[in-house]
Amino acid sequence: MLPEDLPMRILDGSPDAILICDRLGIVRYWNAAAERVFGFRSTEALGVSMNLIIPERFRARHWVGWEAAMKTGITRYGDGQLLAVPALHKDGRRISIEFSIQLMKDAKGQINWIVAVIRDVTERYVRENALRNGRP
């Protein structure tokens, strides 16, 4: 039998950033790795819109896709595919992240939670970009 606190220990101790949002896009869980990746402490992120980490020029597109997923329960990234996007760090710099999402549904099939597992891939992105552009 697994310890009762094991799921929370996994979330809290994950080396990847884990965000859990409600269906309105409000951050309800923010682990220590999310603090490291984005620079915001959990006290700054909890209860706040995900706009906190979404670059302004991508917000409209993000929320259109979000609303469609909330209505239909379908996202093209829900089967474990990684989505690569830019994100914002607290210090204002843009970082590159990859993440997978899981739509958590209630007994009636309504989405009430969205879980994102996120990894900062900025260094790899910069390195690959330099190689593509002929710089070592």
Image (spheres, rainbow, N blue to C red):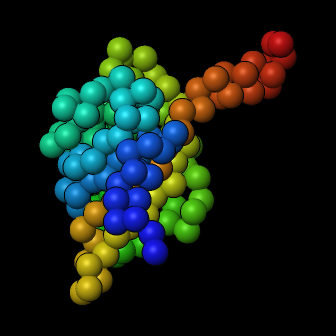
Q: Position of residue 101 (x, y in %)?
A: 45, 58
Q: Position of residue 124 (x, y in %)?
A: 68, 28
Given residues 90 and 83, the one toward you in this image is 90
Q: What's the residue at 79%, 25% (across, down)? A: 132
Left or right: 10, with 131 as reference point: left
Q: Position of residue 7 (x, y in %)?
A: 39, 60
Q: What's the residue at 35%, 14% (across, down)? A: 91
Left or right: 60, with 78 as reference point: left
Q: Position of residue 92 (x, y in %)?
A: 36, 16
Q: What's the residue at 81%, 13% (across, down)? A: 135
Q: Does the rendering let one see residue 70? A: yes
Residue 108, by quadrant, is bottom left
Given residues 110 and 5, the one toward you in this image is 5
Residue 75, by quadrant, is bottom left
Given residues 79 and 7, the one toward you in this image is 7
Left or right: 77, with 51 as reference point: right
Residue 14, above or below 114: above
Q: Does the rendering let one see residue 69? A: no
Left or right: 128, with 49 as reference point: right
Given residues 122 and 132, the one toward you in this image is 122
Q: What's the residue at 45%, 69% (across, down)? A: 2
